[in-house]
Image: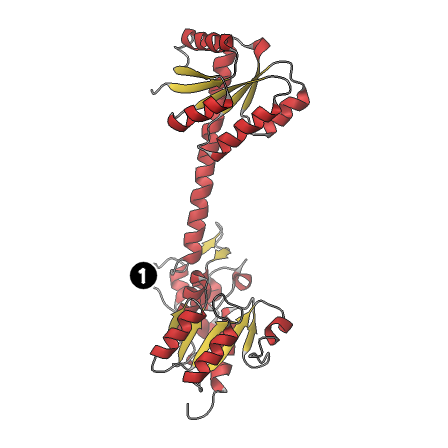
Amino acid sequence: MTPLQGLLVGDHVEDFFLIREMLERNRSLIAAGLEHARSLEEARELMQHRPYRLLLFEHDAGDDEAVRLVTDLLHDGRPVPFILLTEDADEKTVADIIGGGTWNCLAKSRLDGATLVRTIHNTVALHSLQMEQQSAEESLRRLSRAVEQSADTVVITDRHGVIEYINLAFEALTGYSLDEVHGKTPRILKSGGARSRDLSGNVEGDSRRRGVSWDPERGGSETILLVEDEAAVRRATAEFLRLQGYNVIEARDGVDALALAQEQAMIHLVVSDVVMPRMSGGALAKEVARVRPDTQFLFVSGYAGKTILDHKVVDLETNFLQKPYTLRQLSSKIRKALDIAPAGR
C-alpha cells in the first residue's frame, strides 16, 4: 500500500520530530511519512509540487487568520484533509475552526502515538467517504441532465407503477405535462384517445415500440421555424411538432433564424421568443416581413404583458403565448395562428 504522505505546518521544530517519531514507532498500524513547512508560504509552495494526502497544522491561540488562510488554500486546490494541533483553545475557538473546514482537532497535551494514529485513520476515512459522496452526487447531477435532455422518453415510477417523473421528450411525445401524469399509472396513456395510442406499450415495458399516433386534426403539414435558445427545450418541442406532421426548422437565436428564413423556400409560421440576445423577436419579425410578408408569427415569453406590448409586435389575443405553457397549449396556439393566415399564402 502506498504510504500516506503528510505535511506538518508550524514553526515548532520539536513537534515535527516528535510526531514523525510517533509515526515511525507505529508503522505497523499506519504507513505514513511526514514533511515539515515552517510557514504558510512554504507550505503553499510544497503543496504545488507534491501530492500530500494529509495536512497537520499547529494552531496557537490567536492564530485564526492562519487557519483561514490554510482553509482557503485547501478549498482553492485539491481537497486534502487536515488536522489542527492546538493547545489551550476554548470550545468556541475549536467550533469556529471546525466550521472553517478543519477535518479534526487534536490537543497537543493528549498527543501520543495511539491517539495520533486513531485521529489520522478517522480523518482520512471521513475525507474518503465525503469524496465518494461528492462524486456520487456529481454523477447523479450528470445523469439528471442527460435524462432531462434525452431525445428518448423517460418515465420514472415507484414500485407500484405510479409515475413520479417524466422528461421533456415524454411530454413532447404524449402532450402530457408532469402535473397531468404525476401520481397516475401509465394506463393514462391508453385512456388518452388520439393523444398517445401507441406509447403505452413502450412505457409498460415493450422497449421496441416507440412512437405516437396523433389526431391529424390537431397537427398539420406546414413549415414552422422554431426559435429557442435552450437546446433541450428546442429539441423536445421540435420533436413534438414533427410528430404532429409539421416540417420544423430549428434556430438557436434571432440571427440564426433570419439566415434560415432567407434560405428556405417556404416558411408558414415562426415561433419565437420576444426577448432574446443579439436580436429581439420584434426585430426578427420586421426583418422576416421584408422577405416573407405572408409568414405568420407566434411569440412566446415569460415576461409581463406590458414588457411584451412595448415591443409593439404582439397581439396578446392572437399571436402570443405566455410562459410557462404546456405543449398542448402550444399546439393549439400554433394551429390557430396558421388558420388565420392570409388566403393564398
Q: Is mark 1 on a helix, strand or loop?
A: loop
| Identity of the residue furthest to the front in this view | 41
Viewer can see residue 124? no
Question: Residue at label 1?
Answer: 208
Residue type, mark 1 in image: Arg
Q: Residue furthest left?
A: 208
Frontmost residue, 332 versus 46: 46
Which of 260/199 is in front?
260
Q: In which quarter of the image is residue 257?
A: bottom left
Percent coordinates x, y for residue 325 in the rendering: 55, 68
Quadrant assignment for the N terminus: top left
Count of numbered circles on the image: 1
Q: Residue at x 46, y 73 (%)?
A: 193
Classify 290 as above or below 99.
Answer: below
Residue 122: percent from left, percent from top = 49, 21
Point out residue 66 in the picture as x, y percentages from the top left corner: 57, 24
